[in-house]
Image: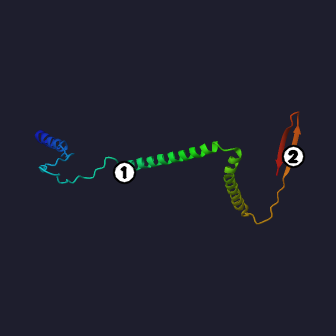
Amino acid sequence: MSDAEANAEARRIIDEVYRPVRQMPTRFKDATPPPPIGDAQPVHQDDRRTVPAWAAGTAVASIGIGAGVTGIGCGAWLVLEGLSAMTITGVIALCAPFIGVAVAALAIGAAISRAKASTSKHVYTGPVTKHTHVTTHTRGTFSRSHTHLHN
């Protein structure tokens, strides 16, 4: 390839790579003139949201959570405002149902726990004999104890 052909090929490759990209329009202007009297005809506009759907959902959820927490706070304030005017007998009477429910839940949980713990499977089928001998030495002023376990 000669120098002239190489230069022409290089120029062609460079022009092809750096060819300007066709730009898409970013706005639309309606060229139809408005009527002299009355409203203009509606023009179709593409639905292009400026806020992504996940962001709008997060905003709505945040507003809902804020309103819910505010309601809970107002309710707690009302309850505590009423409790501050109560006597100790009234507080005990108010707390008694909650204490009863807590004790019942604790009893049910303990019963379920013990029912699960009582089931066991034996691995060994033969007799098991365990010989354990414990030797304890206690000596000294402050009673140092040394326990030795012999199997």
Q: Position of residue 45 (x, y in %)?
A: 23, 52
Name which of mark 1 and mark 2 comes first in the sequence: 1
Q: Quick check: 139 left or right of 109?
A: right
| Nearer to the camera, 147 or 27 | 27
**Residue located beneath label 2 in the image:** 135
Quadrant for the N terminus in the image: top left
Q: Position of residue 150 (x, y in %)?
A: 83, 49
- Residue at position x 66%, y 52% from top? 98
Q: Quick check: 60 left or right of 96?
A: left
Identified by mark 1, the residue type is: Ala
**Residue located beneath label 1 in the image:** 53
- Residue at position x 55%, y 47% from top? 75
Q: Nearer the viewer, mark 1 or mark 2?
A: 1
Examine the rendered structure and indicate whether residue 112 appears above or below residue 73. below
Identified by mark 2, the residue type is: Thr
Circle 1 SS class? helix
- Residue at position x 88%, y 39% from top? 138
Marks counted in the figure total: 2
Q: Position of residue 39 (x, y in %)?
A: 17, 52
- Badge 1 crowding class, 10 Å Cα cut-off, few under 14, some 14 to 19, many 20 or more, is few
Examine the rendered structure and indicate whether residue 112 appears above or below residue 70. below
- Badge 2 crowding class, 10 Å Cα cut-off, few under 14, some 14 to 19, many 20 or more, is few
Q: Position of residue 30 (x, y in %)?
A: 16, 49
Circle 2 SS class? strand
